[in-house]
Amino acid sequence: MPDAEKTLRDERSNLIHQLAELGANDDGQLRDDVSYGEGFADAAAATAERTEVIGLVDSVKVMLDNVDAALERIAEGTYGTCAECGKKIGKARIEFRPESIYCVNCKAKS
Ligand SMILES: [Zn+2]
């Protein structure tokens, strides 16, 4: 399924770019050299900003993990089947979310 792989690789570089813009590395760790103190009137505002950035980084990291898991399944040759029950994942679902590794039923259960 080469189309899915291309989509996933594009998505992956996009997500890594987002992490870099948020000041995080590929592992979702914020770099120490990023300062959140500048431009804020007080430390509380800076902390709130940092907390928000950490939340954003976490959600990007989750998406990145999903993309990596799907790419791994392409490499294994198991892409397109559910990682939980082994059934085929619906075509519409795969096209809508190429990073899906669970069928709709198993995803709903988790
Ligand atoms: Zn399933």
Image (spheres, rainbow, N blue to C red):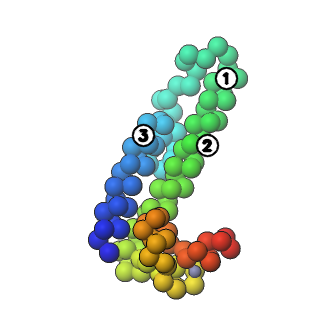
Task: For mark 1, give the secondary structure.
Answer: helix
Q: Is residue 89 left or right of residue 51?
A: left
Mark on residue 16? none
Question: What amino acid type is highlighted by mark number 1?
Answer: Ala
Q: Position of residue 31 (x, y in %)?
A: 49, 36
Mark on residue 55? 2
Q: Position of residue 1 (x, y in %)?
A: 32, 75
Question: Mark 3 and mark 1: span between their CA atoms?
Answer: 22 Å
The correct choice, above or below, for 42 with respect to 34 in the image is above
Question: Mark 3 and mark 2: span between their CA atoms?
Answer: 15 Å
Q: Position of residue 103 (x, y in %)?
A: 55, 76
Looking at the image, tell me whether mark 3 or mark 1 is earlier in sequence order. Answer: 3
Looking at the image, tell me whether mark 3 or mark 2 is earlier in sequence order. Answer: 3
Which residue occupies the foreground of this view, 95 or 62?
A: 95
Q: Residue at x 62, y 29 (%)?
A: 49
Asked whether the beta carbons under mark 3 and mark 1 sit within 8 Å of each other, the answer is no
The correct choice, above or below, for 15 with respect to 103 in the image is above
The correct choice, above or below, for 32 with respect to 57 in the image is above
Question: What amino acid type is highlighted by mark number 2?
Answer: Gly
Question: Mark 2 and mark 1: span between their CA atoms?
Answer: 15 Å
Labels in figure, total: 3
- Is residue 69 in view from this perspective? no
Q: Residue at x 42, y 40 (%)?
A: 20
The picture quadrant for ligand 1 comes to bottom right
Which residue occupies the foreground of this view, 1 or 24?
A: 1
Quarter of the figure with the C terminus:
bottom right
Res 102 quadrant in image = bottom right
Question: What amino acid type is highlighted by mark number 3?
Answer: Ala
Mark on residue 45? 1
Mark on residue 20? 3
Q: Residues within 10 Å of mark 2 (few under 14, many from 20)?
A: few
